[in-house]
Image (cartoon, rainbow, N blue to C red):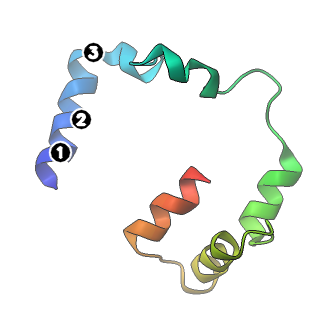
């Protein structure tokens, strides 16, 4: 795992524009757009009240214990 972490650090150091452009143009529409932030959705996510049981349980677990495993953490931040 450390190898992959180092790989991506090196990739960003040699190609810093990767942070701001898409490797595959098909995904360009997924980037944040001006005025697409929804504060109410964020609050629901942070409070564990999205209506998606697995997401809500994960956020409540994080709130209660201050830690979740890496798989749950990856799912929560990608929601």
Q: 52 and 2: which one is in front?
A: 52
User: Residue 19, position in %: x, y?
Assistant: 42, 23
Residue wearing tag 1: 4
Picture layout, residue 27 above or below residue 75:
above
Residue wearing tag 3: 15
User: Residue 65, position in %: x, y?
Assistant: 55, 85
Q: 16 and 53: which one is in front?
A: 53
Q: Is residue 54 left or right of residue 42?
A: left
Tell whether label 2 touches label 3 (CB within 8 Å): no
**Callout 1 secondary element:** helix
- Quadrant for residue 70, please give it: bottom left
Mark 2 nearby-residue class (10 Å; few <14, some 14–19, many ≥20): few
Q: Is residue 49 left or right of residue 53?
A: right
Residue wearing tag 2: 8
Picture layout, residue 23 above or below residue 70:
above
**Callout 2 secondary element:** helix
């Amino acid at each position: 795992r450390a190898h992959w972490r180092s790989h991506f650090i090196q990739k960003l150091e040699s190609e810093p524009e990767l942070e701001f452009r898409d490797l595959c143009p098909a995904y360009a529409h997924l980037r944040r757009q001006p005025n697409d932030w929804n504060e109410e959705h964020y609050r629901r996510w942070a409070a564990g009240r999205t209506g998606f049981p697995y997401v809500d349980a994960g956020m409540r677990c994080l709130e209660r214990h201050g830690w979740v495993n890496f798989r749950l953490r990856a799912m929560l931040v990608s929601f």
